[in-house]
Structure formats: structure tokens, C-alpha cells
Image (cartoon, rainbow, N blue to C red):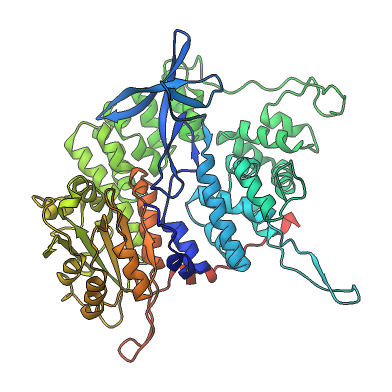
């Protein structure tokens, strides 16, 4: 839930806390590759929510249907009629929402861009460190938006002159950070052509362009500020043209059309016709006759496997080892067979993530019974990096496979926090009062995805109404969490202080910091009692996390944080619908918890906070070839 704009809380956020709040209060994907609709959601950070929809022509009307899952089935529910403007969805006299084509989710992009702009206003250099830190992380939406911002902000290495007009030195060139993000190669962390394209889409977005104008980043009152984007794209394409193997690699990886789109966007002029040949891009003379290369030249046909036998296709896969996306694009009309999928797995054409995503297909084809393939799948499960497996478990039949996929989801959370959780003790305080009647089951589901991240001996859980009770977890798995909460339903009054009191005997060690994560609706108004109980407990939390479930208008946890002088990091409900967000947000939440001051009992701080990690990240520099 979005935090209210209480001045006490806003003023308490310096640049460090601001970025942590942005990283932990995740809202939604910045990109949706399916048609959707946006509906008002006033209690969220961005004020709207996105849902997948489709529409069908029914007589003179385009009727819009919400698409939702019920087990393995997709349920279509009518929500309204799409008007002639192609955007407004209306049912009778009411405007229901707004239809959005696949692509950027403007509200999310603008929200995140504004957070970065606010951070920039507080501390330019910290923003540059954040962008550099993000490059090696898996949060693609954040990376793209940070790269876009750094390419247009106004610290661009301008000369600083003395009173006589002589150049004393040059200002920091933080636009070079944006260039570096586009141009550096970092394995899975570098920007593929789609992400470079997306940077341009972000900068062209109306809300982003308005923010940039307000900040004075662009001179035009009509055109969006693009900063060094065009130059960065030109360098990106030129480097790959001069290194044909790199360009060929992009084509093999399925980025051919994205490279072509980049070239069109900036009017790229290749040095030789080979650029077009590798892309199989037929050139036609422009009306003004400006083009000079490869005009009318025939291009190679796309390499497909139409007409090849199953055995021949398997031989090609084993020999060439193409990635799975390329295999699917080349398949003949006969489609994906058991033998072709087996060859793809054995040739290493599928990543660990691919194997987890394709579990239902592997099960349907009977390949999870094949020893070599089953071993490969088991290894992928053990190295899972997101909770996507938990969602995929809904689409498989065998209980054993479901259990393995749930194990993968638990593994992803544990891996995400295994380093940052060292030196910290975590207390979960869960509201089970009668005001939670509608939300308690939801809270339990969320905790299944959350609690598995933490070591049992450093995790303490309490539930409370007017009395508090400590829960014992027999296992940190989802099954262990379900068992601990079994039979505990919503009832009684509310006393957050009793929840804290139930675990007050679990003191942190002298060299440990502590974090309290509250789950509830904040419907308790004994603020003084909660603050006193926390102070008397000796736990000395360095920060709060708050997962506020629907139903309450109170603010006791946030108000207590203000009185205690510690940050309170909000945890958005929306993260639990996204398999990639849960591990990421938990990691950032733990890492964000401040480190306690050294004392006689605590001589050395063993932990490094997220803010320290960001500040210690070296500001990115362009690769040598980019000048």
C-alpha cells in the first residue's frame, strides 16, 4: 500500500532512504507484452492497476473481456465496451478503465522516473552510483529507466571557467554512465537491442518528457529530450558492424528485427553493405535518393527447417546448439516433437529458466522420466533465481513435479538473501485480529513466499490479537509455514504491542542487527504502548518493514517508526504476483536495514547495507572503444 504523504515521513527520507523505498516498494512491470487495461487503484503508489484483457467484435461493439486464471483454465469476464478512441472502456454510463496495447506501462515508467528525478535532486552523485550499481542487477525495468535518465540529465562534462573565462576543469560527465550502461558487455547483465530500444521509448513517453522539461534537461518545448541516446545507439550499432561475429550473434539470438528497429530509429548509416546482408535487410531507395548502399540487392532467405525430417532437425540442434527461441522460430509446421525437445535439452539449448518455464511441456512429452533430462531439470530447480516455478506448478499434473517446483521457488528466495541475511535477526509480527477476517488467508499466502528466505535460528514469528503468541516453524519451506499457521484464524481485538511482547525474549546477539516486519492493516491506535514495548524489549530494531493488507486506515507502524527515528520500508502487495520481485524485494529490504553503531559488545559491524553497497560501486565508464 502507498504511504500517506505525512510530512514527518517525507522529511525523514534522505537520498539513501529514498532509493531504498523505491527498491523495496515495487509497483508493477514497466512493460507488458500483452494487451491490458488500467483501472483506478488509489491505495497503490502509482494510483492504477494493470490487468490482462482482450476484446471481441460483437455486432457494432468491441467488447472487452478480463482474462483471469482458474486453475489451468482462462476465464473471460466482460468488463465493458471499447470506445471509438481505442482507449476508453465504458460500461453503460460508467468509464471502467483504459485499454493499453502491449508495450510500456506509462504510469509505472513515469512513477519510477519521478523517483529517480527526486533522488537526483537530492544527490547527483548518489544517483550516478545507483545507476552503476544497477547494471549488474537483474531488475531490467529499473536499469532501463536509470540509463534513460543518465543519458539526458544535465551533468555532461561541461567546462567550468574562472572569472576571466578560462577553463579551470570540466564538470563530472554523468551522461557517460548512461552510455556505459548501453555499451558495456557484462554477460547476462548487458543491454540487448530490445532494452536499448526501450530506453528510447522511455524518453519519448509523454510523462517522462514533461519531467525532463521541468528539470531543464531539454531545450525543445515540443520534442522530448533525448540527450546522448542517439550517439549511444550509433556507437552500439557501429561496434557490432565492425565486429560481424557480434552482429551475427544478435541475429542468431533472435534480435534481428530489434537491430533493424534501432537502425531506423536513429537513421543509422552503415559503413558497408555487409551490415544489411547479415540482417537479411533488403534496401529500397528513399524518395529523396539519399541511400547509397545495397539498393535492390537480393538478401538471403531466412533459415528455416521446413522440409527437413525430424532426424535432420535433431542433428542440426545437436551440431549448432541454437538457443530455444531460435529453435521455435525455425520449426516446420509439424511443430515441437518429443525428439526435438529432447535434442534441445541434451544440446544445452535451454537455460535453467527455460527448463523451469517449460516444465508442463516436458511433463506432457514424458521427458521428465528420461534420466539425463530429469537430471538436467533437477539441476535447474536447485539453481532457480525467481519464484516463477510456484506459478508454473499450477499447470502440471504430478504431485512430485509440483513439490519440486515449489522447492525451486523456495530456493530462489533463499539464494537471494543468503549473503545479506548474515548478521541480522528478523522478527515477523502478524495481525490476526477480527479486522483481518478478509485478509488473514492472503497474509498467510504472502508469508509462505516470504518466510522461506530466512534461517530458522535467526527468524522469530508472532501472531497477535489482544494476546500475542510465538509460532514455531518446523521448516523454513512453504509447507513449514503453512503448518505453523494452520488453524489460526482472524478473531478478537488488536494490540501490536502484544505481538512484539510475544518475541521480546528472543534478543539479538551483540553483533547482530534486527529488523521487524509487520503484516497487518494497522488498525490499532495505542501508539504509545507499541513504542514503549519496542523500547523495553531490548530488540532495538534498526528498521521496520510493513506489508499493509487491505482493510485498514490506521498508521500505527509507520507512526511508531517516526517516534523511534528509524526507517519504515513499505512492501507492496503487487510483488507477490510477480515471481521475479519477491526475491529481489526481500534482498533489498534486508540489505537496506541500517547497521548498528559499534560498541564494546559489538566491536565490528559485519554487515554492509544496501546504501553502502551502492556508494562503494565504482561509477561506470564507457568502454575504451567508445571514446
How many labels, in total? 0
Q: Residue at x 34, y 43 (%)?
A: 577
Image quadrant where one finds the C terminus? bottom right
Q: Is residue 311 visible?
A: no
Q: Residue at x 51, y 47 (%)?
A: 141
- Left or right relative to 168: residue 218: left
Q: Is residue 57 visible?
A: yes
The spot of residue 8 in percent (x, y) is 43, 68
Would you identify the image quadrant in which residue 561 lies?
bottom left
The spot of residue 415 in percent (x, y) is 34, 58
Q: In this view of the protein, which residue sits in the foreground, 331 or 495? A: 495
Q: In this view of the protein, which residue sits in the foreground, 106 or 446? A: 106
The spot of residue 109 in percent (x, y) is 54, 45
Q: Residue furthest right?
A: 164
- Left or right relative to 208: residue 141: left
Above or below: residue 214 compared with residue 260: below
Would you identify the image quadrant in which residue 118 lies?
bottom right
Above or below: residue 559 compared with residue 46: below
Q: Residue furthest bottom?
A: 600
- Left or right relative to 180: residue 370: left
Above or below: residue 498 compared with residue 401: below
Q: Residue at x 33, y 22 (%)?
A: 76
Q: Residue furthest left?
A: 487
Would you identify the image quadrant in which residue 392 lies?
top left
Q: In this view of the protein, which residue sits in the foreground, 99 or 306? A: 99
Amino acid at each position: 500500500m502507498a504511504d500517506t504523504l505525512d510530512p514527518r515521513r517525507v522529511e525523514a527520507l534522505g537520498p539513501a532512504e529514498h532509493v531504498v523505498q523505491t527498491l523495496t516498494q515495487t509497483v508493477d512491470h514497466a512493460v507488458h507484452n500483452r494487451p491490458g487495461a488500467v483501472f483506478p487503484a488509489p491505495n497503490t503508489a502509482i494510483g492504477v492497476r494493470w490487468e490482462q484483457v482482450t476484446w471481441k467484435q460483437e455486432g457494432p461493439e468491441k467488447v472487452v473481456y478480463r482474462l483471469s486464471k482458474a486453475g489451468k483454465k482462462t476465464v473471460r469476464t466482460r468488463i465493458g465496451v471499447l470506445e471509438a478512441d481505442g482507449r476508453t472502456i465504458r460500461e453503460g454510463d460508467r468509464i471502467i478503465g483504459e485499454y493499453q496495447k502491449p508495450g510500456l506501462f506509462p504510469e509505472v515508467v513515469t512513477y519510477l522516473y519521478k523517483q529517480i528525478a527526486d533522488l537526483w535532486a537530492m544527490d547527483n552523485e548518489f544517483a550516478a552510483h545507483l545507476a552503476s550499481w544497477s547494471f549488474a542487477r537483474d531488475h531490467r525495468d529499473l536499469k532501463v529507466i536509470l540509463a534513460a535518465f543518465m543519458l539526458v540529465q544535465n551533468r555532461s562534462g561541461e567546462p567550468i571557467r574562472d572569472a576571466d573565462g578560462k577553463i579551470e576543469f570540466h564538470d563530472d560527465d554523468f551522461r557517460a554512465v548512461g552510455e556505459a550502461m548501453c555499451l558495456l558487455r557484462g554477460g547476462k547483465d548487458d543491454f540487448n537491442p530490445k532494452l536499448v530500444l526501450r530506453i528510447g521509448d522511455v524518453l519519448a513517453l509523454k510523462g517522462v518528457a514533461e519531467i525532463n522539461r521541468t528539470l531543464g534537461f531539454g531545450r525543445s518545448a515540443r520534442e522530448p529530450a533525448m540527450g546522448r541516446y542517439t550517439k549511444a545507439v550509433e556507437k552500439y550499432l557501429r561496434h557490432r558492424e565492425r565486429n560481424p561475429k557480434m552482429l551475427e550473434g544478435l541475429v542468431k539470438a533472435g534480435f534481428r528485427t530489434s537491430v533493424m528497429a534501432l537502425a531506423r530509429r536513429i537513421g543509422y548509416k552503415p559503413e558497408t553493405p555487409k551490415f544489411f546482408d547479415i540482417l537479411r535487410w533488403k534496401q529500397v531507395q528513399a524518395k529523396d535518393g539519399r541511400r547509397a548502399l545495397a539498393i535492390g540487392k537480393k538478401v538471403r532467405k531466412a533459415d528455416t527447417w521446413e522440409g527437413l525430417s525430424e532426424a535432420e532437425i535433431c542433428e542440426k540442434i545437436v551440431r549448432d546448439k541454437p538457443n530455444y527461441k531460435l529453435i521455435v522460430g525455425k520449426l516446420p509446421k509439424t511443430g515441437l516433437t518429443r525428439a526435438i525437445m529432447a535434442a534441445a535439452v541434451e544440446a544445452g539449448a535451454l537455460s535453467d529458466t527455460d527448463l523451469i518455464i517449460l516444465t508442463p511441456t516436458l511433463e506432457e512429452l514424458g521427458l521428465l522420466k528420461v534420466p539425463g533430462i530429469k537430471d538436467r531439470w533437477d539441476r535447474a530447480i536447485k539453481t532457480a533465481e525467481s519464484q516463477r516455478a510456484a506459478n508454473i506448478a499450477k499447470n502440471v499434473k504430478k504431485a512430485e513435479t509440483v513439490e519440486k517446483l515449489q522447492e525451486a521457488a523456495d530456493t530462489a528466495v533463499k539464494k537471494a538473501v543468503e549473503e545479506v541475511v548474515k548478521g541480522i535477526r528478523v522478527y515477523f509480527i502478524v495481525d490476526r485480529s477480527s479486522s483481518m477476517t478478509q485478509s488473514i488467508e492472503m497474509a498467510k499466502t504472502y508469508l509462505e513466499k516470504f518466510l522461506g528466505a530466512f534461517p530458522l535460528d535467526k527468524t522469530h514469528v508472532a501472531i497477535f490479537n489482544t494476546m500475542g503468541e510465538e509460532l514455531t516453524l518446523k521448516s523454513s519451506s512453504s509447507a513449514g509455514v503453512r503448518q505453523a499457521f494452520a488453524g489460526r484464524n482472524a478473531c478478537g481485538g488488536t494490540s501490536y504491542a502484544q505481538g512484539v511482547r510475544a518475541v521480546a525474549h528472543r534478543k539479538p546477539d551483540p553483533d547482530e542487527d534486527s529488523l521487524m516486519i509487520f503484516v497487518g492493516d494497522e488498525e490499532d491506535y495505542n501508539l504509545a504502548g507499541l513504542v514503549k514495548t519496542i523500547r523495553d524489549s531490548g530488540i532495538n530494531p534498526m528498521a521496520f518493514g510493513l506489508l499493509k493488507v487491505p482493510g485498514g486506515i490506521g498508521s500505527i507502524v509507520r507512526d511508531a517508526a517516526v517516534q523511534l527515528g528509524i526507517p519504515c520500508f513499505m512492501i507492496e502487495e503487487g510483488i507477490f504476483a510477480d515471481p521475479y520481485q519477491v526475491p529481489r524485494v526481500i534482498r533489498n529490504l534486508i540489505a537496506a536495514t541500517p547497521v548498528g553503531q559499534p560498541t564494546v559488545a559489538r566491536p565490528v559491524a559485519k554487515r554492509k547495507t544496501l546504501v553502502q553497497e551502492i556508494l562503494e560501486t565504482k561509477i561506470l565508464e564507457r568502454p575504451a572503444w567508445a571514446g
